[in-house]
Amino acid sequence: MVWVFSIWMQSVKQVLSGEMLGKPVNVRGWVYRIRSSGSIIFAVVRDSSGIIQVTIKKGVVPEPDFEAAASTGIESSVTVEGTLAEDERAPGGYEVRAISFAVVGPSEPFPITEYQSTELLLDQRHLWIRSREQTAVMKVKDSMLRGARNWFHENDYVEVTPPIITGVSAEDSTTLFQLKYFDRFAYLSQSAQFYLESLIYSCDRVWSLTPSFRAEKSKTPRHLTEFWNLEMEAAWVDNEGNMKVQEELVSAMLRSVVEERSPELRLLGRDPAALEKIAPPFERMSYSEAMDELQEKGCDVLWGSDLGAVEERELTMDKEHPVFIVNYPKELKPFYMKENPEDARTYKNSDLLAPEGYGEIIGGSERETDNALIIERLKDVGESLDKYQWYIDLRKYGSVPHSGFGLGMERVVKWVCGLEHIRDAIPFPRTIARVYP
Ligand code: 4AD
Ligand code: MG
């Protein structure tokens, strides 16, 4: 067989469009299902774009090709040449009637069969990611990332590349991953925020996509120890402006996914029309209002309690659109947020909660510009000022009001795809119990 890439470019999706009806087609992919009924073998072949039925008839294909098909199993990689025919019983309504069939890479009995335990699927993650659901999730993520990148580009943001190895804690210092860095210690980044803050003085508006690490000791369906953080920071933007950026960005990401991945959304049981309806402005509710609502609903919370998964679920279960919760009590949030001049117990910040009970997908705030307050708060939490000197410096040389946020990609994908667990929003999830595969 001659391997000329261009003639093998037909995807299953292109073949299923039916344009080649009655004409010769080539399919290459992996065996998804296969069964034989004597002199005819029915194989379903999948590639990234879909699945298609192939019939291999004794006497029509060369005998060695028939033998190869008869003895091959699921997940073997194959190439098929044949004619495209209509068949209403076949998935997608078409089948390829083979004139040749070759196994490129045979497959041992595949370790994943129907109804497997969650643990087995996680152990076999390197193989399980071939599933159609997992493929659909990865494609949804791909479109959302592209939607975000395009939106930032169209709105004059500069994509920057902050470090992953760092000496500071950007969030909760109890979830830092420490690493030995030659003769001292360093940490894996929890957030690129402080580096993005440094970059606005030259680039005005910046964004980055980096892995963020949190040594989360709890097992929850919404925490990973490694996740992809889409972060932005902009000069001359206050907390309200920051929320406008978030609602525009999220809506653009949703448009991109609905445009490009509606079949994948349907395969995952999601209605693209419901996502398409989501548009700015998103509802804004103060933390205090949220507390009142929770108390009315009978939740055991007091002003000052954190909003956990349960409370966020309660607040968003009946919503069809995301909602901002603004002005959290200072005790619940990190030191770098801007004090709220209208209520000094709170910050000018927001968490964006996804609808249908999915909860927090973005955390953001206006940043404190008063170095005295920053130093006081750092001291309060027992941080050494030396490590943060460079961050404090930023306010000494042409300080400006500025804001930013971090969007957890896997949290958003979990919501958009309707996943029960965040580990299915990333091909190789990292959790407290797992670094294999
Ligand atoms: O709310 P967080 O902790 O905010 C920050 O890191 C800010 N420094 C971001 C910024 O302003 N530049 O994290 C941001 C988002 C959360 O809203 C959530 O979506 C996600 O990151 N996230 C996680 N996702 C998965 N697993 C975890 N353990 C996560 N922790 C946060
Ligand atoms: Mg947060």
Image: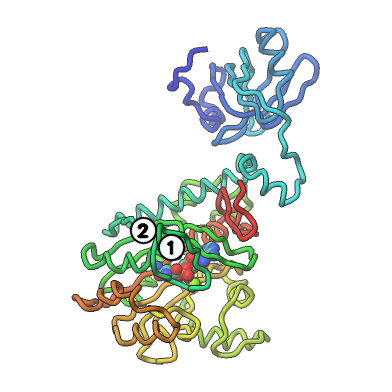
Q: Which residue is mark 2?
A: 163
Q: What SS does tag 2 mark?
A: loop
As shown in the figure, which amino acid type bears the numbered disc 1?
Answer: Ser
Q: Label 1 to label 2, Cα distance in Å? A: 8 Å
The foreground one among 194 and 274 is 194
Does the beta carbon at disc 2 come under 8 Å from ligand 1? no
Residue 208 quadrant: bottom left
Q: Residue flagged by tag 2: what amino acid is it?
A: Pro
Above or below: residue 292 compared with residue 281: below
Describe residue 110's horizontal placement relative to residue 436 as left or right.
right
Q: Which mark is residue 189?
A: 1
Quarter assignment of residue 210: bottom left
Between 369 and 244, the residue placed more toward the observer is 369
Asked whether the residues under the numbered discs 1 and 2 touch, taking CB atoms below 8 Å apart as contact, a structural biologist would say yes
Where disc 1 sits, the SS reads loop
Closer-to-camera residue (285/334): 334
Number of callouts in the render?
2
Q: Tell me if 307 is positioned left or right of 168 in this view.
A: right
Q: Earlier in the sequence, mark 1 or mark 2?
A: 2
